[in-house]
Every structure is written in structure tokens, then in C-alpha cells.
Image (cartoon, rainbow, N blue to C red):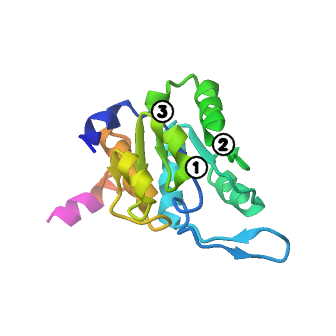
Amino acid sequence: MGNYKSKLHNIKAFAFDVDGVLTDGGVISLPDGDLFRTHYARDGYAIRVAIEHGYPVAIITGGVSPSVEIRYRNIGVKDIFSGARDKLPAFREFCKKYNLSPSQVAYAGDDIPDIPPMKVCGLPFCPSDAATEVRHLAQYISPFPGGRGCVRDFVEQVMRLQGKWYKETDDIPEDMLETASE
């Protein structure tokens, strides 16, 4: 796996698969053809904070789901590639749009279709319950499973190292800091 932490400094953007990364991979078919998925709120929060700090974020998924588009557009994701059975062209398009080298993008995947972009990105990572082939390729395996914090875990590490994550004293009135330390 190597020392992935040395690469965190170079990350300028994130790309994520949906099923198995941003969700636990379970789906329920709805009568309208959409699929019901649960998304972990803390993963969404981390994505929103990354976007607010200027990190481009892409969602690259083989599925086509209006609910996924709505979910991620509502937190600020502009680049959603749905129906991307071959994910590498979408990954390259995302890099080109933001004038990024693939080495500046971290990609999270959990299964075989994610392997092509994981092979070319700067830092491939995955949830703890990813497919064996993906875990062998990942340079970081989160201790959290898909849909249960693996995205938050990684995004927070990048942003903390780059000095962009929330600090304990951010947005706390000065007089409260004095009280808390007494």
C-alpha cells in the first residue's frame, strides 16, 4: 500500500463512485424505476465542505438515478457522470474541465468498474468492504465501510493536512473559548 500520506499534499480534487462508496451498496427498486439508497450524512457534509474550500468534486457512477443527482446537486456537486459504465472517459473529462493532472485527483471506488480510473488517479482509495481486487489496488483503505464514513474519513484527512478542515476554535466566540479552557 505504501505511504499514502505523502500524496495527500498533492490532492486538489475528488471523484467518487456511488453504490458501495457513498452508499452501502444496498438498493431497493421503486415503482418509478429509480432505486432507493441511503447516503451517510457525514460523507455529504465532507463533500460540501470540500466544495466550499474550492475542491472540484465528481460523482462517477454506472447507474442512472434522479435521486442521486438531486442528492449531490443539493450539496453543491456540479460534475455528475451518470450511466458511466466505462468510468475512465468521465474521469478524464473531469480532469480536463478543471485543468487537473490525474495525479492531483483522489478517486474512491469499491468494485471492478472503478479499477480503470483508480489506476490513473493520484491516490486511489476505497472503503473497508470493497472488492478484493480494488483493495489490492487502493493506496488507502478506509477503516469504514461504504456508505458509513469512508468518504468523510479520507476527505477530512486531505483537508486537515492542507489546513482547510474545520478547526476546533472556528466559529466559537472568544469569550466561550476562555470559559471552556478554565
Q: What's the residue type where badge 2 is placed?
A: Asp
> Residue 5's x, y, as percent?
27, 40
Q: CA distance from mark 3 to mark 2?
A: 14 Å
For label 2, the crowd category at 10 Å Cα-Cα, with few meaning under 14, some 14 to 19 and many 20 or more, is: some
Q: Are marks 1 and 2 in contact (CB under 8 Å)?
A: yes
Q: Earlier in the sequence, mark 1 or mark 2?
A: 2
Q: Do tag 1 and tag 3 residues touch (Cβ < 8 Å)?
A: no
Q: Residue 33: where, in percent of width, then height?
A: 82, 69
Q: Main secondary structure of the magenta part?
A: helix
Report whether residue 150 is seen.
yes
Please name whichever residue, 112 or 49, is drawn nearer the observer in this view of the structure. Answer: 112
Q: Which mark is residue 113?
A: 1
Find the magenta span and give its range: 176-182
| Residue at position x 66%, y 42% in the image | 86
Q: Mark on residue 86?
A: 2
Find the distance from the CA under tag 1 to the CA under tag 3. Answer: 13 Å
**Upstream in the sequence, badge 3 or badge 2?**
2
Vertically, is 129 above or below 141?
A: below
SS of the residue under disc 3: helix
Q: Is residue 42 left or right of residue 7?
A: right
Q: Are marks 3 and 2 in contact (CB under 8 Å)?
A: no
- Is residue 93 on the magenta stretch? no
Verify whether residue 181 appears in magenta: yes
Q: Position of residue 23 (x, y in %)?
A: 55, 65
Residue indicated by mark 3:
120
Residue 9, horizontal then vertical, whole percent: 33, 33
